[in-house]
Amino acid sequence: MGLNLRQKNIRRRLSLIAAAALLGLTIGGLPAIAKPLIVEPAKPDVAESPLGSYLAGRHAQYARDPDAAIEYYRTALKTFAGNKGIMRRVAILLITEGRIDEALTFTKSLTDTKGQSSNLAKLLAALEDMRGDRLGDAEAALAALPKTGLNLFTRPLLRAWVLAGLKRYDEAEAEIDAKGDNKAFVALFGVHSALINVLKGEPEKADAQFKAAIARRRGPNLRLTQLYGNFLERAGRSADARALYDIYMKAQPASTMLGAAYKRLDAGEKPDAAVADANDGAAEALFSLAGSVRQQNSRQALILVQLAVRMKPEFTLARLLIAETLESQQRNADAIKAYRQIAKDPGYAWTARLRIADNFDTLDQANNAVQELRAMARADPNRYDALVRLGDILRRRKRYREASRAYADAKARIPNLERQHWSLLYTAGIANERIKNWKMAEADFLKALELSPGQPFVLNYLGYSWVENGKNLDRARKMIETAVKKRPRDGYIVDSLGWVLYRLGDIDGAVKHLERAVVLRPEDPTINDHLGDVYWKVGRRNEARFQWERALALEPENDQIGKIKTKLRNGLKDG
């Protein structure tokens, strides 16, 4: 087989290696969000009966069309007036959509019920009392919440802020400190103790509590950095604030979230208090809780963070969490709308626009994503992350030549390549390999390994490519063996080692590793095809044909189909 044919034959193989490697990568210091299967909202015909409206509402709710669900449920309530179950569904949907005033018309009728309906109604009533400066009523409403489930956190946190609003600071601290023997409580409540002491006028105590909260974290946290930095700036400790921000930026070098803080420091200006009153504190509490439960229960997180914005409408970071949660719920069009609103805040605009592009890509609107990212790249010639995002989207769309140019432009904007840039070089190498610019691809892969030695995905991709090109065979084998040691359960990497051993004549070793690769990735046609080849080589002809038939059934790339069919008819010519 000639070199060009071999290169063509491995393109799908290398794309799978790349895909596996990039699943968890983060570019530009932003949290990676997995791209889920898109579920198109379905709007069924509403049956004439009230029951039909209720069922249509449930269907719309599960299809992630909350506006339609709300209208269907409201139609059902015209007949089933006062039905607590339907009212609760409507209230929850309205809150998740940020339509709190409408939700109140339903929750006021739920306060005398039992269970979750009552808990939600009492929580919302307490927050509305706080907003209306009826802190005594808010305290009573919170006291009525049971000490179970999420209320174990919500109740004491919000009650502490009510007490702080009443200037009963010692009681507020005691409400939180009583949970000091529980690590989960300590981690969550420590920041709020500090914020309460800021309001109380105890800066030394607040400072110690902020430091303790930071020490409990495994790494820099954006909101904690913002809150403590705000305290330091207002206390005139500009150098300490800058040092704190620098620590965060070292961990997240591409972040733009602290841009406003640095500008203030440079101008010698002091910020307004991040938490100026009890309502702000309640918003922080709800935001913290939303972030804590988001992975386990996105709907609950959305309720909490919408309530946080209710308490503090200018809370942009909470609005960002709303958009991210909508995105995680596959409501990408709604997420784009939310990010557009966030993009009006200069401190968060860049992050929001990157996410807008991601959501356009998920919605299969790649041209809109490309347009957004190219505009961003033109707007700030000093940043490279929009170009990296652009390259990633183009590469996934198999627009490799354009992707290669985007990656090249990104590299040109980086004065000194550092360890965190290995992933850019890796993806640039993939794009260059696809357009048969092997010299540049090889240089990219080698530079990636120089910056971050031992990266298993780079070792695997480069090693596999070298073997297919008949180059550096001993080094390639060692590289892939190292990759397997680092990721022994990665079927694609294990397959690479098996296939390389086969190409190098170690058939027994190839059988061993390819059999394991099929166990790890039974659905992959290329791996099954490889195993069929080595089975044929060792005389296991029936098993070889079984693997080839299985490979065909798994829908391989078009250029593989004819080759597999030929092997099924004739076997391997040199076997």
Image: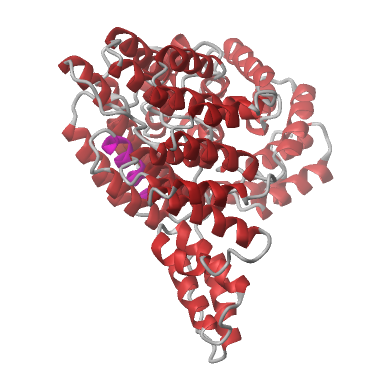
**Above or below for 14 versus 270:** below
Q: Is residue 143 magenta?
A: no
**Above or below for 99 versus 241:** below
314 sits to left or right of 123: left
Of residue 29 and residue 492, the one placed in the foreground of this image is 29
Question: In terms of image quadrants, where is residue 482?
Answer: top right
Identified at 45% across, 40% down, the residue is: 282
Range shown magenta: 348-361
Q: Is residue 350 magenta?
A: yes
Of residue 11 and residue 33, the one placed in the foreground of this image is 33
**Above or below for 471 versus 327:** above
Identified at 27% across, 23% down, the residue is: 261
Identified at 52% across, 71% down, the residue is: 60
Report the quarter where the C terminus lies. top right
95 sits to left or right of 183: left
Q: Position of residue 538 (x, y in %)?
A: 81, 31
| Residue 548 in view | yes
| Residue 63 in view | no
Q: Position of residue 291 (x, y in %)?
A: 51, 38
Extreme-bottom residue of the structure: 48
Q: Position of residue 432 (x, y in %)?
A: 37, 29
Colouring chosen for the image of the structure: secondary structure
300 sits to left or right of 553: left
Of residue 51 and residue 507, the one placed in the foreground of this image is 51
Q: How many marks?
A: 0
Q: Position of residue 531 (x, y in %)?
A: 73, 37
Of residue 221 and residue 427, the one placed in the foreground of this image is 221
Report the quarter where the N terminus lies. top right
Q: Dominant secondary structure of the magenta stretch?
A: helix
